[in-house]
Amino acid sequence: MNSYTNTGTQAFTITHARKIASKVATDLKRLQRFYNSPSDSDIQAYETEIIELLKEGYLGTVKYGFKKDDKWIEPTLCYTAKDFSGMSPEDNDPGRITPEVNIEGANFYSYLTYNSNWDKLTSDEKDAFKKALPFQRTGASEPGINGCLITDKIYSSGGKGVERSLVKNY
């Protein structure tokens, strides 16, 4: 079992990572229900990816949503990894995805960043980790945001978690 120990006595395990990732996947299913994207197979792949990134402690941020004119638009979701060691953060239920936003001319897109733990890995370690994931991300510049990010939820377990933000149009 892969795990790492927080500064307290609690160990973060794959079970914790799966709990958090399942909430992200639920949000993605709601996007699918309202906007017909992403596909079931993509949601499964994104869930597997986030489980592995959380388990190993490499996730910075990941965004899933719609991009138009190289900018994120509503309804886009942003998840930022957080360390809640020594705190008692909320663990919210997934949901509250805005239905019926005009996404005409936009495409579903995902963008991921790694954290400083990733930067400590060798090139070979990074390559090996990426090869074990369900799909390979390629380099791209990060889209801007058409609107603003509003933080609304925390999904946490085992002292770690993600803070969810939504893109909201001005």
Image: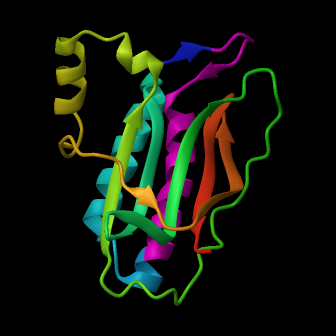
Taking the magenta stretch, the answer to whether it contains residue 109 is no
Spot occupied by residue 128 in the image (x, y as percentages of width and height): 18, 21
Q: Name the image quarter holding residue 149.
A: bottom right
The answer to whether residue 2 shows anywhere in this view is no
- The picture places residue 118, in percent across and down from the top left corner, at 38, 20
Is 39 located above or below residue 20 in the figure?
A: below
**Residue under the point 66% across and 73% down:** 96
Question: Where, quadrant-wise, is the N terminus in this rendering?
Answer: top left
Between residue 101 and residue 125, name the one nearer to us: 101
Task: Relative to 65, say whether 99 is above or below.
Answer: below
The stretch of residues the image draws in magenta is 6-31
Q: Percent position (x, y) of residue 109?
A: 31, 62
Magenta span: predominant SS is: helix
Residue, far right: 88
Residue 85 shows up from this direction: yes
Q: Nearer the viewer, residue 68 or 158?
A: 68
In this rendered view, identify the residue nearer to me: 166 or 22. Answer: 166
Query: Would you say 168 lies left or right of 77 here?
Result: right
Name the colouring of the figure.
rainbow
